[in-house]
Image (cartoon, helix red, strand yellow):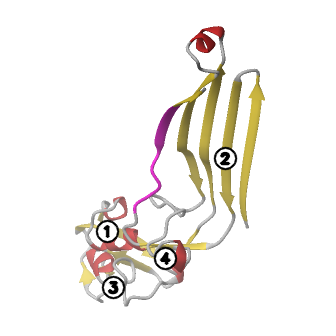
Amino acid sequence: YDLTLGLNGRWGNLSMNMLFEHSQGGYYSPRTQWVLRRFGTTADTDNEVTLSKDLKNVDGNTIASGTTVRGFVHDFGGGEVLLDEAWFRHGIGGGFGDNQAYNFSVKDATFSRLRELSVSYLYNGEALQNMGLSSLTFTGTARNLFAWYKELVGVDPGVNVGGIQTGFGLDYFANPSTKSFLFSLTANF
């Protein structure tokens, strides 16, 4: 489900507007992360391990005990294996593997975000009336101040590589929503 909650409040000449957004569930494929892993440019690939026993990698090559390599030792259920450069370059641990979106590479897209916060002050003092103005409104707005993601790291599920017309759930070097600050002055005559 998706939820958007807008709150408006006014106290005297001060007003506040807030827009909160939550999306529960859904899936997201962070393809940018998988491509960058292939090139060894993510924190996932920046680990060194010294092997305590001979281990095979995804290519079936045996790496000797005592060897220090970039990678991880992992047990998928059939014994320990080495997830080294081969895993990230052409195995299913990086790139697109055989160009399939594997279940392990799909993340829970649950997120919450403070989409917008706006504070305004209305000034309608006597000095303005002498200048031919009835009021001035000063407004400060901040967008995308805070976001919480259940599983996604470095990915904004609010954007999609194909744009809104093609759906939701695929990231491939898409630009994230920006954090922005706006200020305005409105004059009423």
| Rendering coords of residue 93 (x, y %) | 39, 78
Q: Is residue 105 left or right of residue 22?
A: left
- How many marks overall? 4
Quarter of the rendering containing residue 99? bottom left
Which of the numbered marks, if any, corresponds to residue 36?
1
* Kind of residue sitting beneath label 1: Leu
Say if 90 sits above or below 113 in the image.
below
* Kind of residue sitting beneath label 4: Ser
Earlier along the polypeptide chain: callout 2 or callout 4? 2
Quarter of the rendering containing residue 82? bottom left
Regarding residue 53, the answer to whether it shows in the image is no
- Mark 2 or mark 4, which is nearer to you? 2
Along the viewing direction, whichever of 108 and 24 lies nearer the viewer: 24
Earlier along the polypeptide chain: callout 4 or callout 1? 1
Earlier along the polypeptide chain: callout 3 or callout 4? 3
Which of the numbered marks, if any, corresponds to residue 19?
2
Say if 166 sits above or below 67 in the image.
below
Q: State the separation of the CA atoms marked 2 and 4.
A: 31 Å
| Residues in magenta, as a range | 175-184
- Mark 3 or mark 1, which is nearer to you? 1
Along the viewing direction, whichever of 89 and 10 lies nearer the viewer: 10
Earlier along the polypeptide chain: callout 3 or callout 1? 1
Q: Is residue 63 left or right of residue 78?
A: left
Q: State the separation of the CA atoms marked 4 and 1.
A: 13 Å
Q: Which residue is mark 4?
A: 105
